[in-house]
Image (tube, rainbow, N blue to C red):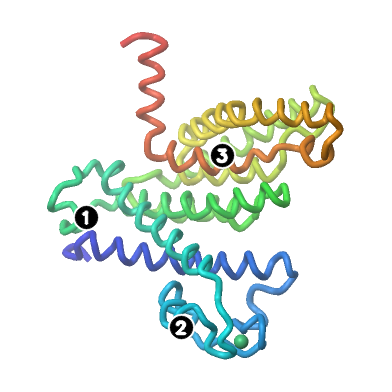
Amino acid sequence: MEEIPLWYWLLVFFAFGACVGSFYNVIVYRMPRGISLINPPSHCPLCKKHIPIRYNLPIVGWLWLRGKSACCHQPISVIYPIGEALCGLLGAIALFAAVAVVGGVPVSASFFTAPVTEPAVWASAFAMFWLLLGAYPVCAVDCKYKLIPDSISVGGIVAGLLISIIPGGVAPLQSLVGAVVAGGGLYLVGWCATKLLKKEAMGFGDVKLLAGYGALMGVTGAVETLIVAAILGIVVMVPYGKIAARRNAAGQDAAETSGQIPFGPFLAVAAPFMYLWGETLFKLYIKLVFGE
Ligand SMILES: [Zn+2]
């Protein structure tokens, strides 16, 4: 494993990401239709015939069939392989960022041929993989259904604790404390805000999601994520709120625009950036405020 060059691992991470993307395609198709994710096994939605595994391979399957189903020769949307390719790209970016940013390896001619030897880089690569590939379902599901899937939030706590076993990254105790303090802290903030505003101020999904980020990034990373997400939320939602208010005044689709704003997407977007650059950003901020 010590001699395997980085380019090979980048391909592996791409393939792994594409498989996750393929699974997302299944979820996006089946969940709103109330079909189980496992049963029935992969079948053609038009003629109900079973799809053999070789045609189910992400990206490759679609290219192999030239975008038409093998059973009934109906066109298969190009959205599916594109989604898989994008998820594959996110997987490769996770490893690339871990080596270049966390590992501090300069991107030069030997960057792609050198092996990955630091265990800490692997820990970061897995954490980044989780953060980047989890961001999509959090954004999509929270915007549409106003909830965050437990598989991502609670799954993040489990993933964080597992990754912490790899030496060099966030240590197991840091991970555990991160989950408890980040989740517990946000729960307290939400509880106080709910008492003050006399209405539900923070969903429990956000609490579990931040607990997961605490487990993956430690307390500081989670707090930085929360701060940046809140700033992003204000920057995006203030103009949105004004538009909504104007629409409400005009009596247009009031029910749609006055709805609760999901916070999960802001957390999910901020997290990978804060994982990579949170410390740098924080130091820059201290320098700006306190000088030197
Ligand atoms: Zn068919």
**Residue at the location (45% across, 73% down)?**
58
Q: Secondary structure at mark 2?
A: loop
Q: Nearer the viewer, residue 95 or 256?
A: 256
Q: Percent x, y for residue 13?
A: 36, 62
Q: Percent x, y for residue 92?
A: 35, 57
Q: Quadrant of the C terminus?
A: top left
Horizontally, is 192 left or right of 53 in the view?
right
Residue type at mark 1 is: Thr
Instruction: Decide: is 19 above or below 110.
Output: below
Instruction: Decide: is 179 above or below 17.
Output: above
Horizontally, is 37 left or right of 126 in the view?
right
Tell me the quadrant of ligand 1: bottom right
Q: Nearer the viewer, residue 191 or 35?
A: 35
Instruction: Decide: is 196 above or below 83.
Output: above
**Residue at the location (41% across, 24% down)?**
282
Q: Nearer the viewer, mark 3 or mark 2?
A: 2
Instruction: Decide: is 267 above or below 125.
Output: above
**Residue at the location (70% across, 51% down)?**
144
Q: CA distance from mark 1 to mark 3?
A: 31 Å
Q: Nearer the viewer, mark 1 or mark 3?
A: 3
Going from N to C along the chain, the mark reached first, 3 or 2, is 2
Tag 3 residue: 267
Tag 2 residue: 65
For the residue carrying disc 3, how many other residues have a C-alpha within 10 Å: few (<14), some (14-19), or many (20+)? many
Q: Residue 235 — which label?
A: none
Task: Let me know if residue 120 appears in the view.
Answer: no
Tag 1 residue: 117
